[in-house]
Amino acid sequence: MFAIIMAGGSGTRFWPLSREKMPKQLLNICGDDTLIQQTVGRILPLIDRDNVFIVTNQALADDINSQLKEKFGGSWDNSFIIEPEARNTALAIGLAALHFERIDPDSTMAVLSADHAIQRGEAFLDLLRMAGETAQNDYLVTLGIVPTRPETGYGYIKAGKELIARSSSQTTNGSKPTAHGGVYRVDAFVEKPDRATAETYLAKGGYFWNSGMFVWKTKTLLQEIEKHAPALHNGLVEIRNNIGTDRESDTVREVFKKLQPLSIDYAVMEKTGRAAVIPADIGWSDVGSWTALDDVVVRDRSGNIKTGNVIDMGCSDSIIYAEKRLVAAIGLKDMVVVDTPDATLVCPKEQAQEVKAVVAELKKKNAEEHLTHRTVHRQWGSYTVLETGDRYKIKRIVVHPGAKLSHQMHHHRSEHWVVVAGTARVTSGDKIYNVHTNESTYIPISAKHRLENPGKVPLQIIEVQNGEYLGEDDIVRFDDDYKRHENNKRRPLPEVKKSS
């Protein structure tokens, strides 16, 4: 079995903690590991790491790569399938299917999300095994989450005739699908219901939350795409014909640009006669908004979830998140309070879904608060924007021992560096020299330069930028330990390992 993990989302409903360049799948939301680390770690007992691939955009690939290396070691450089732009799930899944087709035409693929929380990991792996076996009969299998409440935020799957019986040791409830196993034909995919309809689904049984997790034979999926989504099929054929040529990357970009965004549900699953559902009782949450934490994080005696520098006086059933700054909350009930260095969210829990409207407003105003945090983590360390003004920006930069930034230049800004801790090794033009604590140096506009930490303690510098344009995209890289200077050359599909 191969796995693709869909990791290109922006997680707007988790703002202000989640940002476009640091979305929720990269955050430690419910545990010590990030959601992407949890997702990969969850499936490694079943799927070999060489068969795990991440579908994402170029901007997120480097950060995900860094997190996977940090957690699991080894190289993940050849584990990325790059989307040139977001076009919903159908085209991204089809692109991954082309890759698996090249590796093994008879392969089975599991489609998973990078930002789901699953509490019962062993039960989840058992269901993936069952789904893999079912897929060998040319079914397109989805995991339907057993509902625990009349949820209006999810689509539903209506289960029909039982296709593969449950074992005799499992309890039964007539012919009604339950949480105890079995495989059922999908009767219908149902849009998000109102509350009264959701309550009816819960009472009747046989309806499951649409998890967006799938298992199928690669060959079967591509056949069903050809049958039910001809425009998508034609685009995939165009890509297939150019894989391995100089036209591959350009062809992928062209196909992504011209095709309409389609979900895999709409393109295939709602139309195929081969859809099957397996009921899944696995402690699942899509961590879709702040209120989803109630399902995956332990609450205190008053029903609160508190993180960071918080003083709570008489609050109940609330979520209060703080970083370095103190947050004092008095008498709150059913509220969400999230404080970060550059933005604060306060809203009732019942309106937590509306956070995405705030992000939309920030995008309209071209405000940086929807894009990135003041502190940005990189493989070499981090930088924090301390102040921005007319023609200047002040940063604090921290470089890990032994790490170095790329050899680079800027067209529009000069930089002054003051070392406040550690020793900096500086390349500026053709000169290489050390700068010690309480010393400084100057990097002129257009000078090729590099910052490195040769020591055994973190290097900290204060950087003052001056210039007419101070955007992070004013960087020309000539050499980089993390290969970011090669990003524009990265192919959408990884190289296929040839058997000896």
Image: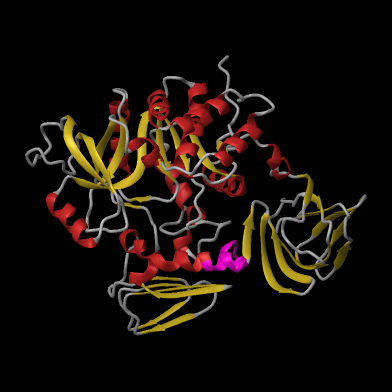
Residue 67 in view: yes
Is residue 393 inside the magenta stretch? no
The answer to which quarter of the image holds residue 334 is bottom left
Question: In the image, residue 477 lies at what x, y percent?
Answer: 78, 47
As drawn, 386 above or below 206: below
Q: Position of residue 343 (x, y in %)?
A: 54, 73
User: Which is nearer the eye, 152 or 10?
Assistant: 152
Residue range of the region highlighted in magenta in the rendering:
361-373
Residue at left offset 10%, top offset 40%: 171
Q: Is residue 99 visible?
A: no
In the displayed structure, 5 sits above or below 246; it is below
Most foreground residue, 458 or 32 = 32
Q: Position of residue 416 (x, y in %)?
A: 83, 67
The x, y position of residue 271, in whole percent, is 32, 35
User: Which quadrant holds the C terminus?
Assistant: top right
Residue 3 falls left or right of residue 394: left
Which residue: 60% across, 62% down?
A: 372
Which residue occupies the extreme right position in the image? 430
Please state which of residues 345 and 49 is positioned toward the viewer in this rendering: 345
> Does 369 sit left or right of 7 as displayed?
right
Q: Is residue 448 left or right of residue 328?
A: right
Q: Residue at x 88, y 64 (%)?
A: 442
- Quarter holding the N terminus is top left
- Look at 56% across and 41% down and name the residue there: 73
Quadrant of the image occupied by residue 253: top right
